[in-house]
C-alpha cells in the first residue's frame, strides 16, 4: 500500500485528523498565549491572532471528534476540508498584502501554515473521495 493510500484509508484518515487537531491546538494555544509577542514579531494584529486562535479551537474539537470515529462522517469531514482550504486561502491572502505591516517572519509563519494545512486538506479530501467510492461499490 502506498503512503497516500495508507493516509487516506479509514485508519490513516483518523491519524491525519488527529494530527490536524493536535497541530491546530498548538497553533491556537500559541496565538492566545503569546499574542503580544507574536503580534510584534509577525506584524499581525493582536485581535487577528486572538480571534483566529479562538476559532481554531472549534475546529480542533470537530477534528478531534472525527479522529475518534471508526469512520468519520462525510458531512463533518467535508466541513473540515472546506475549513482547511479556507484557512490556506486566508493565510496566503494575509501573507501577500492582506495584513499591513506583516514582517518577513510573519510571511514565513503564514506560508508555513498554508503549506501544512494544504497537505492535510488534500489528504482529507482524498479520504473523503475514497469514502464515496467505497459507498458506491
Image (cartoon, rainbow, N blue to C red):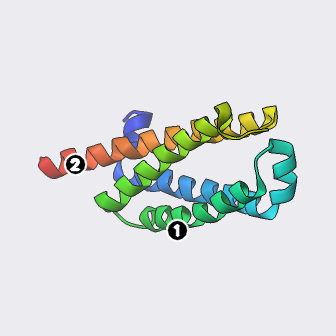
- In the displayed structure, 108 sits above or below 15; it is above
The residue under the point 59% across, 66% down is: 57
The residue under the point 40% across, 33% down is: 2
The residue under the point 40% across, 42% down is: 6
In percent of width and height, residue 41 lies at: 86, 44
N-terminal label among 2 and 1: 1
The residue wearing badge 2 is 132
For numbered disc 1, what is the local secondary structure?
Answer: helix
The total of numbered circles placed on residues is 2
- In the displayed structure, 72 sits above or below 8; it is below
Q: Is residue 94 left or right of residue 105?
A: left
Q: CA distance from mark 2 to mark 1?
A: 24 Å
The residue wearing badge 1 is 61
Q: Is residue 102 left or right of residue 85?
A: right
Q: Is residue 15 left or right of residue 52?
A: left
Question: 74 or 5: nearer the eye?
Answer: 74
The residue under the point 64% across, 65% down is: 54
Mark 2 vs mark 1, foreground winner is 1
Amino acid at each position: 500500500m502506498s503512503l497516500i493510500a495508507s493516509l487516506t484509508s479509514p485508519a490513516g484518515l483518523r491519524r491525519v485528523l488527529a494530527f490536524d487537531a493536535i497541530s491546530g491546538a498548538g497553533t491556537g494555544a500559541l496565538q492566545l498565549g503569546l499574542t503580544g509577542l507574536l503580534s510584534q514579531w509577525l506584524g499581525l494584529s493582536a485581535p487577528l491572532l486572538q480571534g483566529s486562535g479562538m476559532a481554531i479551537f472549534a475546529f480542533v474539537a470537530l477534528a478531534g471528534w472525527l479522529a475518534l470515529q471508526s469512520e468519520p462522517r462525510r458531512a463533518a469531514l467535508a466541513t473540515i476540508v472546506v475549513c482547511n482550504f479556507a484557512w490556506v486561502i486566508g493565510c496566503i491572502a494575509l501573507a501577500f498584502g492582506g495584513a499591513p505591516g506583516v514582517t518577513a517572519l510573519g510571511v514565513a509563519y503564514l506560508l508555513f501554515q498554508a503549506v501544512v494545512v494544504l497537505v492535510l486538506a488534500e489528504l482529507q479530501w482524498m479520504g473523503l473521495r475514497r469514502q464515496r467510492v467505497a459507498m458506491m461499490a
